[in-house]
């Protein structure tokens, strides 16, 4: 494999050490100070990161433009950047939160739905999106259930090692997307474990175009495929930060999957049901989602 250009290596190295220093700092600051600092940092980012700001505004107009005035769109965009900052600070302070006890900060709603899914003896597939502090949610779920998450390796192996180490410390297993991931996922579900998958991003994995905020969006089919192969129930969940800086984790009932003689139609319908379940969380807490992501980047073939 060819070595990356010197400029790229220097940039990646600078980012890596900046994050290491930031992690060190966040673990030592009082929680409220860290959250307020990153709240303001998020607002600063809204004003200086023009491309990310414009993408956020464009996507919010696409999703809510028919119902929101422009001033409301701009206000929501600012709230998105601020919430992203606060949730990033919380993720960086995860070790402190674990030490202090997550139960002090998190309200758990709907636990019975995941317990009911697991009672079927097929494991459970939990679908979610990049809402709130999703890393904190995984750590919290892992304190109650045997959890593995599926994730794409980060561009810098050093950062990826940091992330995987944090997940291991939090008590859950990381399954990287690679050639053998499917076998590992199937083994995990057959053992009765909970599998967490993020399905709200336009990525280079097998997917289908389904409705997302009124627009066709390329959406991963993995949860539907694994549910079909293992009979594991699919259960939606999400986390959001409240006004008092506490968090709520909500699990909703199992998604009923369509099963007819038309396998192709079933696949599309079930992917859309999963997508709609995540969308409903985002609609309830729009300021907590990553609206700068190019969710509608991939276009349907003509």
Image (cartoon, rainbow, N blue to C red):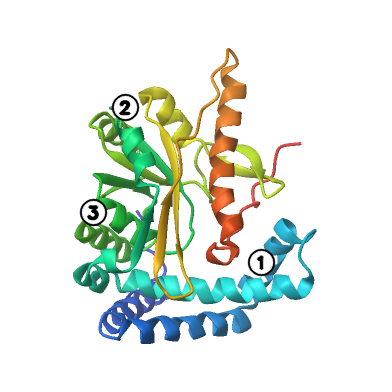
Task: Please give the name of the residue rendered at 34% of the width and 76% of the height, measured from the top-left corner.
Answer: 19
- Residue 202 is at least partly visible in this image: no
- According to the image, label 3 marks what residue? 143
The CA distance from mark 3 to mark 2 is 21 Å
Numbered tag placed on residue 55 in the rendering: 1
Task: Please give the name of the residue rendered at 68% of the width and 71% of the height, measured from the top-left corner.
Answer: 54
Secondary structure beneath disc 3? Answer: loop
Q: Nearer the viewer, mark 1 or mark 2?
A: 2
Secondary structure beneath disc 1? Answer: helix
The CA distance from mark 1 to mark 2 is 43 Å
In the rendered image, residue 27, in percent from the top left (x then y), is placed at 26, 79
Does residue 190 sit above or below 278 in this rendering?
A: above
- According to the image, label 2 marks what residue? 120
The answer to whether residue 5 is left or right of residue 290 is: left
User: Which badge, 1 or 2, comes first in the chain's sequence?
Assistant: 1
Q: Nearer the viewer, residue 82 or 299?
A: 82
Q: In the picture, residue 261 is in which quadrant?
A: top right
Secondary structure beneath disc 2? Answer: loop
The quadrant the C terminus occupies is top right
Task: Please give the name of the residue rendered at 39% of the width and 51% of the height, measured from the top-left corner.
Answer: 152
């Amino acid at each position: 494999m060819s070595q990356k250009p010197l400029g790229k290596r220097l940039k990646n190295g600078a980012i890596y050490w900046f994050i290491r220093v930031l992690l060190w700092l966040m673990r030592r600051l009082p929680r409220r100070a860290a959250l307020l600092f990153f709240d303001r940092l998020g607002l600063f980012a809204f004003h200086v990161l023009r491309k990310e700001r414009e993408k956020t505004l464009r996507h919010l107009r696409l999703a809510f433009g028919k119902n929101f005035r422009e001033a409301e769109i701009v206000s929501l965009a600012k709230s998105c950047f601020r919430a992203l900052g606060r949730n990033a600070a919380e993720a960086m302070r995860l070790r402190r939160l674990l030490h202090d006890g997550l139960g002090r900060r998190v309200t758990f709603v709907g636990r019975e739905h995941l317990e009911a899914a697991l009672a079927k003896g097929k494991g459970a597939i939990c679908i979610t999106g990049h809402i709130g502090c999703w890393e904190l949610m995984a750590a919290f779920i892992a304190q109650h259930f045997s959890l593995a998450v599926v994730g794409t390796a980060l561009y810098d192996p050093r950062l990826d090692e940091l992330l995987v180490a944090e997940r291991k410390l939090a008590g859950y297993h990381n399954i990287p997307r690679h050639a053998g991931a499917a076998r590992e996922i199937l083994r995990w579900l057959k053992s009765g474990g909970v599998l967490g998958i993020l399905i709200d991003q336009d990525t280079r994995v097998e997917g289908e175009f389904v409705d997302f905020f009124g627009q066709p969006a390329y959406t991963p089919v993995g949860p539907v495929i694994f549910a079909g192969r293992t009979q594991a129930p699919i259960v939606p969940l999400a986390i959001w930060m409240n006004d008092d800086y506490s968090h709520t984790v909500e699990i909703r009932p199992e998604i009923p999957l369509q099963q007819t003689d038309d396998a192709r139609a079933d696949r599309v319908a079930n992917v859309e049901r999963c997508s709609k379940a995540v969308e409903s969380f985002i609609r309830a807490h729009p300021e907590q989602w990553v609206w700068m992501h190019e969710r509608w980047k991939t276009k349907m073939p003509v």
